[in-house]
């Protein structure tokens, strides 16, 4: 079982490496010049975008078609604010793939916890213990001795056993606190 996560991580790293090596050259969508021109006389304000180099990032090269004529072009262009923008689509793709991979792993773990774990517990502890009501909390908890049962069934200790043992210890502590507060009316200071 420990080999599957290792292969998943290795595959993810290999995929990231391949994507990064393929997108090392700049795409035309990765660089652009964006000019924001405010309203001028009868012309409404507009945003212009062009894929041009850094040296050509100005109003004269980006604003097409020019909304004003002749001598108003210079006055119009002085009001426009042009910025050169650059992004790395390869990094964006790798980040999205990693995010979706982690989200997928979390979803698989959630499915395991909600569907498979109760079935496994039913096999180990019997169906009758799972049906007990919540009013019977205390020493009669369905999985209060889960760690001991799993140890007796000769299963090797794993993270699930440790988590379940810690969970049961926490439940016992909460139950003791409830008894002391509600039954004995003693509040810890």
Image (spheres, grey):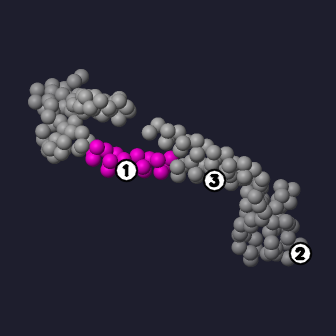
Tell me the residue that label 3 is attached to: 93
Q: Where does residue 6 sit, x and y in percent of width and height?
A: 53, 39
> Where on the picture, by quarter, is residue 51?
bottom right
- Could you say which is closer to the camera, residue 87 or residue 64? 87
N-terminal-most mark, 1 or 3: 3
Q: Where does residue 114 sit, x and y in percent of width and height?
A: 32, 49
95 horizontally vs 149: left or right = right
Q: Nearer the viewer, mark 1 or mark 3?
A: 1
> Where on the picture, by quarter, is residue 152?
top left
163 horizontally vs 135: left or right = right
Tell me the residue that label 2 is attached to: 70
N-terminal-most mark, 1 or 2: 2
Given contact means CB atoms under 8 Å apart, are the residues at marks 3 and 2 in contact? no
Q: Secondary structure at mark 3?
A: helix
Tell me the residue that label 1 is attached to: 111
* Residue drawn at (35%, 35%) of the image: 160
């Amino acid at each position: 079982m420990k080999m599957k996560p290792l292969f998943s991580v290795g595959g993810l790293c290999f995929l990231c490496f391949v994507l990064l090596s393929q997108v090392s050259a700049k795409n035309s969508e990765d660089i652009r010049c964006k000019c924001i021109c405010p309203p001028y006389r009868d012309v409404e304000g507009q945003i212009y975008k062009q894929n041009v180099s850094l040296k050509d990032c100005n109003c004269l090269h980006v604003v097409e078609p020019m909304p004003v004529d002749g001598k108003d072009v210079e006055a119009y262009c002085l009001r426009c604010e042009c910025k050169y923008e650059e992004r790395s689509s390869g990094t964006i793709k790798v980040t999205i793939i990693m995010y979706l991979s982690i989200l997928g792993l979390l979803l698989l773990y959630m499915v395991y916890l909600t569907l498979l774990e109760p079935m496994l517990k039913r096999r180990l502890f019997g169906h009758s213990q799972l049906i007990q009501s919540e009013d019977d909390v205390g020493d009669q908890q369905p999985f209060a001795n889960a760690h001991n049962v799993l140890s007796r069934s000769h299963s090797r200790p794993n993270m699930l056993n440790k988590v379940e043992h810690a969970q049961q210890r926490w439940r016992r502590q909460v139950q003791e606190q409830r008894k002391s507060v509600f039954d004995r009316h003693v509040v810890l200071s």
